[in-house]
Amino acid sequence: MAAVSAAPMPPRLALRAHPSSSASPLPMRALPFLRSRLRSLTTAYAVKQDAALWTPAPVSAVSAATSDGSISHVIVDLSDAADLVDSYTTPGQYLKIRVPSAADELKPAFMAIASPPGEGPRFEFVVKTVPGTTAERLCTLRDGDVVELGAVTGDGFALDKINPPDVAQTVLLFATGTGISTIRSLIEFGFAANERADVRLYYGARSLQSMAYQERFKNWESTGVKIIPVLSRPDDSWKGERGHVQDAFYRNKNIVNPSSTGAVLCGQNEMQEVRIVVVSRPFCITLPLSVLSLRKKLFATCESNCYYIKLCMNTLK
């Protein structure tokens, strides 16, 4: 039998410390530099990624939306952002907005889009001035100033819950403060209000001086929406509804058929009380809320990572 010889082993390399080596080897001394370099690369990548998430666009108009100046109307020109315009498809959707010069010091603001989908290459916003926030900065901008918009987000109002009109012959709209922005979007986008028996908008504000869009009421009513302003702090000359929107509704519900009644709510903390008023009825409801409201878990169920929630009232007890 032939003998099998083992394969020759590679020669061993003798490793010796370099004469100049010390107790602190070169790789250890290089760690601070490497860490700094890694941070620089990470920051550069993050900046590149962040830039891809924002669309710069010029402001075309900023004007007072209320006579007391507490709310502003901001229009952003999106002539060069067709993809962003096309991504807005349903009333009730929203996005983040920031002012580049204040990006490092102020958090982006969540803003519901007030103009209806398909109206043209612009987004309109109703902005309440809040000191020390992006909202305040937005209200001080001038024509031509640049803002940055994030992606259009959220599903918007669940219009399938109130359509076709036979499903919800009565539709109740509730809005407070700047919550009127998405209600405007819904009304002007259209939901066949004139094909329904009863469509009401309960719109709450402190006073007429702090109520936006009054100049649009006549046009809204011509589409089949009855406007019911509700003032919490009116002057003595006010002859209309007083208190809060849920109070006005409760005083005169006049619901003929609860099973064919839908409700659309937009606001913040006030909407919790509205929900309590209508929850005993088997209404179909779609609710957009602020992020703040969701974080406070004001509602029975919600998607924690979603700005808007949709609930069917006959599932809540």
Image: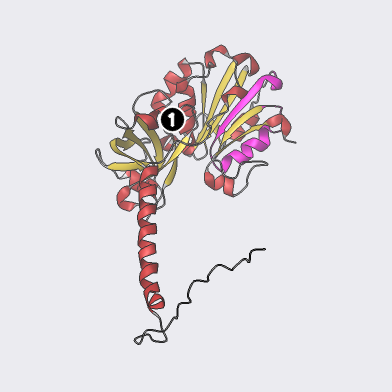
- x, y (%) of residue 99? 33, 47
Q: Quadrant of the N terminus?
A: bottom right
Examine the rendered structure and indicate whether residue 88 appears above or below residue 222. below
Q: Secondary structure at mark 1?
A: loop
How many labels sit on residues?
A: 1
Q: Quadrant of the C terminus?
A: top right
**x 72%, y 35%: residue:** 316
Q: Nearer the viewer, residue 23 or 36?
A: 23
Image-quadrant location for residue 85? top left
Number of residues whose C-alpha sits closer than 10 Å to that of mark 1, classed few (under 14), some (14–19) or many (20 or more): few
Q: Is residue 108 magenta?
A: no
Q: Is residue 157 left or right of residue 285?
A: left
Q: Is residue 234 left or right of residue 197?
A: left
**x 54%, y 47%: residue:** 292
Query: Over which residues does the magenta segment extend?
Result: 257-283
Q: Nearer the viewer, residue 311 or 100?
A: 100
Disc 1 residue type (three-letter): Ser
**x 33%, y 52%: residue:** 102
Image-quadrant location for residue 245? top right
Q: Is residue 148 left or right of residue 229?
A: left
- x, y (%) of residue 210? 42, 38
- x, y (%) of residue 152? 45, 35
Q: Nearer the viewer, residue 215 or 305?
A: 305
Examine the rendered structure and indicate whether residue 55 appears above or below residue 217. below
Q: Name the residue beneath numbered marker 1.
A: 87
Farthest right residue?
317
- x, y (%) of residue 18? 37, 84
Residue 6 in view (yes/no) = yes
Q: Is residue 258 magenta?
A: yes
Farthest left residue?
144
